[in-house]
Image: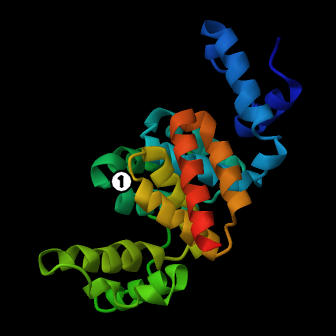
Amino acid sequence: MAITENAKQYHEKMFPGYVSDFLRTDPEFMERFDNFAFDEVVNHPNATLDDKTRFMVILATLLGCQGIDEFQAIVPAALNFGVTPVEIKEIVYQAVAYLGIGRVFPFLKATNKVLEEKGVTLPLEGQATTTIDNRRETGTQAQVDIFGEDMRDFWQSGAKESTHINYWLVDNCFGDYYTRKGLDYKQRELITFCFLAAQGGVEPQLTSHAAANMKIGNDKAFLIAVISNALPFIGYPRSLNALRCVNEAADKLK
């Protein structure tokens, strides 16, 4: 068995002219991994995504599973497939709401390093659309647009001792991040789904965001394709958990 022509061609599009040293040190492993990830998965009819979306999924997935070395390697490939510096930065920024700065900080540093090596001038053009004064209101509207009218008063719901956390979810998570330019709601819900699926242990939130994805047009078949493309990077247990959450969300929406 050898690396297939399809896998070779896809790898060349990702990393033009680059030959991995793993082909010398781990040839059998690389043969099987490249054939699977960059031929079998990429070309499966149930895993069909356009290349740009595929690499947005991979970047968000690597953030979620804390694959910092692979993330830094994939950023140039994402750029080669049309993911813009703004879109990459927006993926990293939004990850803070779902992973925390403690886990995202190394990825922000890695992103800046790669972008500057590619000649991108930092900082990029600002993408914020809210102010300190209106971020709660605009965050509420983002929640309503994605989840439905039932979220209108979420910011003031819950037990008195923890209402502030619901408030922060609205003004910070949605008001500070979802309202930014650079990605639309469908893309933001997509990357949130990837963050949650890849980190594991957050199945209630993953099911909720699977339903939100479907409500705004990222249907079940699309989410299965997303899981399929994430699978080589997060493995089978978390992929199967994500698939179960998608199925549960789809059943609830029937």
**Coordinates of residue 152 in the picture (x, y in percent):** 40, 90
Q: Quadrant of the N terminus?
A: top right
Q: Quadrant of the C terminus?
A: bottom right
Residue extending furthest toward the top: 25
Question: What is the secondary structure assignment of the residue under circle 1?
Answer: helix
Q: How many labels sit on residues?
A: 1
Which one is nearer the viewer's eye here, 252 or 132? 252
Residue extending furthest toward the left: 161
Within the image, what quadrant is residue 132 found in? bottom left
**Coordinates of residue 48 in the picture (x, y in percent):** 79, 50
At x 42%, y 72%, the residue is 177
Residue extending furthest toward the right: 5
**Coordinates of residue 95 in the picture (x, y in percent):** 42, 58
- What colour-coding does the image apply? rainbow
Q: Let me know if residue 148 appears in the view.
A: yes
At x 76%, y 47%, the residue is 47
Looking at numbered disc 1 in the image, what kind of residue is underneath it?
Leu
**Coordinates of residue 98 in the picture (x, y in percent):** 38, 59
**Residue holding disc 1:** 99
Within the image, what quadrant is residue 216 found in? bottom right
At x 36%, y 44%, the residue is 106
Vertical placement of residue 130 versus 186, above or below? below
At x 43%, y 53%, the residue is 203
Is 229 on the left-hand or right-hand side of 127?
right
Which one is nearer the viewer's eye here, 241 or 189? 241
Vertical placement of residue 179 versus 59, above or below? below
Label 1 CA crowd tier, 10 Å (few <14, some 14–19, many 20+): some
Is 125 on the left-hand or right-hand side of 35?
left
Q: Let me know if residue 122 appears in the view.
A: no
Is 123 on the left-hand or right-hand side of 254?
left
